[in-house]
Image: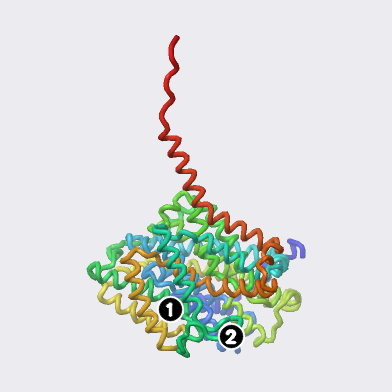
Amino acid sequence: MSLLGIFHDLLYGIGVAASPTNLFVAAVGLLLGTAIGVLPGLGGTNGIALLLPLTFRLQPTSAIILLSSVYWGAIFGGAITSILFNIPGEPWSVATTFDGHPLAKQGKPGIALAAAFTSSFIGAFISIVLFTFFAPPLAEVALKFGPPENFAVLLLAFATIAGLEGGDPLKSVLMTLLGLLLGTVGFDIVSGSPRMTFDVVALQSGINFIVIAIGLFGLGEILLTVEEGLRLEGVRARLSFRDVWETWKLFPRYVWTIIRGTALGFWIGVLPGTGATPASFMSYGLARQFSPRGHRFGTGEVEGVVAPETAAHAAGIGALLPMITLGIPGSPTAAVMLAGFFIWGLNPGPLLFREQREFVWGLIGSMYLANVIGVLIVLTMVPAFAAINRIPFGILAPLIVILSSVGAYAANNQVLDLWIMLASGLAGYLFKKLGYPLAPLVVALVLGDMTEQALRQSLIMGQGSPAIFLHRPIALTFMAAALALVALPALRALRRQARGRRGAAPAPAPAPRG
C-alpha cells in the first residue's frame, strides 16, 4: 500500500473514531481502565475479560475501541499506586516503583507521576505511528522468532537487570535464586506433574506474581513506615501544574532513553507471548547501564521512571500488531481481545485490513485519539492523585491494606493468596531491614516461568542439545549481547582500576644535568 493510501485510510479511521459514540466509548474505557490499573491484582487482562460481555451489544468498532481504551487506561493507572504507595497495580509497573516511589517519598509525587504519564504518551504515540505504517512487514519478521529466539531475548532481559539495586552481589544472586524457586511452584509445563505444591491444591496453579509483589512492596513499606513513626515522608508535598511543566523541561536530556525504550518496548510487544513486563524491566536495566546518572537509579531518578513507562506503553501497542495482522496475540491482554474478535464475527489476519476497513482503521484512529485523551485526563488529575499522599497515615494505611487484600484475592479468587501476601509483607520488611534487594527476586519470579518454558521448548526442538542456540543466528546474536551486558560492569571496573593505577603512578625522575 502506498504512503498516500495509508494517510487516506488513517484520516478515515480518525473520522470513525472521532464520532460522538466512539469518543464517549473511548473516554469511558479510559476512566474504567485507569480505575482497574490502580487496583492491584485486578489488572488490564482481568478487567477486559470482565468487560467483554458488555461489548456484545455494541458495534464491533465501538467494542474494540472500548476494550483498547480500557487497556490504555490500565497502563496509565498502573503507575499511580506504584509511585504513591510502592504497590504495583500491574506487573509492568514494578520497575516504575524502583525510582517512582523514592521520588514520592522525597515530596515529589507530582514530578514522578508527570514523568510516568508523559513518557507513556510519547512511547505509545511513536509506537502507534510504527503500527500504522509498518504493521504487516513487522508481523512477518516477528514470526521468525521461535522458542530459541524468545529464550535469548529473555536471557538478554536478565542480563540488562544484572546488578539491579547494586549492593552486595551475593545477596542479589540469593534473591534471584529465591525468585526462580518460587516461579517453579505449580504444574510442570512439560510433564504436567505438580512441583513444590506440598499437596496443596490451591498451589497447583502456581504463585501469582502480583500477590508476592503486593506483599513485598506494599505491606513491607507500611511495616517500615509504622516503625519509622507512623508518618509518610511525602505528606507535606505541595503540588501544582508547575510540577508538570518543570518535569517536561527535563525531558530533552532523556531523548535516547525514550527512543531506546520505545524501540525495545514496541519490538518486545510484537513478539508473541512476551508482553510489556519484560520490556519494562529491560528498558530500566539498559537505562541504568548506559545513563551517566545510572549510579543514582533506585534513589529517585526521573530517568528511572521514564525508561520503564515508555517501554511498557510501547509494548502495549506492539502486542496488538500480531493480533490484528496474523491473529496471534502478543500478550495475555491481546489474547482476551482476540476472543472478542470471534464473538463479534471477525476473523483476524491480513484480509481484515481489506474486508473490515472501518474496524481496523477505526481502531488505529482510536489509538491516536485515546492516547491524547488519556494523557490529558491523567495529567489533569496529577494534583488530585498526588494529594492522596497528604492523607494522614492512620487513615491511609488501612485503606492501602484493604486495597491490597482485595487485589490479592482478585488475582485467583482464593484465600490462600491473602496468606501469601501477608507472608510476603513480613518477608519484604525483613529483607529491607537486612539489606537484601527486592528487585532481583521480583524480576526472577516474573521472567523465570517464561524463560523456563522457552528453554525447555528449545531443547525439545533441538532433541536435548543446547547447540540449537548456536544454529539460530538471531538467538546467537541476542545471547552474545546478553554476555556482553553481563561483562560490561566488570570491564568498567577494570577500566577504573587501570585509570586509578595510572593516576597513582609516581612522576618520572628529572633527567640529570650535564
Q: Where is residue 301 in the image (x, y as percent from the top left)?
A: 41, 56
Mark seen at residue 192: 2
Q: Residue at x 58, y 85 (%)?
A: 192
Q: Which of 128 and 264 is in front in this view?
A: 264
Q: Where is residue 226 in the image (x, y as percent from the top left)?
A: 26, 71
Q: Which of 172 and 298 is in front in this view?
A: 172
Query: Please, is residue 283 above or below residue 64 in the view?
Result: above
Q: Position of residue 56 (x, y in %)?
A: 60, 89
Q: In this view of the protein, can residue 182 be seen by the observer?
A: yes
Quarter placement of the C terminus: top left
Quarter placement of the N terminus: bottom right
Q: Residue furthest left?
A: 229
Query: Please, is residue 93 above or below residue 186 in the view?
Result: above
Question: Which three-letter amino acid code belongs to the residue tagged 2?
Answer: Gly
Which residue lies under the disc numbered 1?
A: 211
| Image position of 322 (left or right of 429) | right
| Image position of 478 (left or right of 423) | right
Q: Nearer the viewer, residue 203 or 144?
A: 203
Q: Is mark 1 on a helix, strand or loop?
A: helix
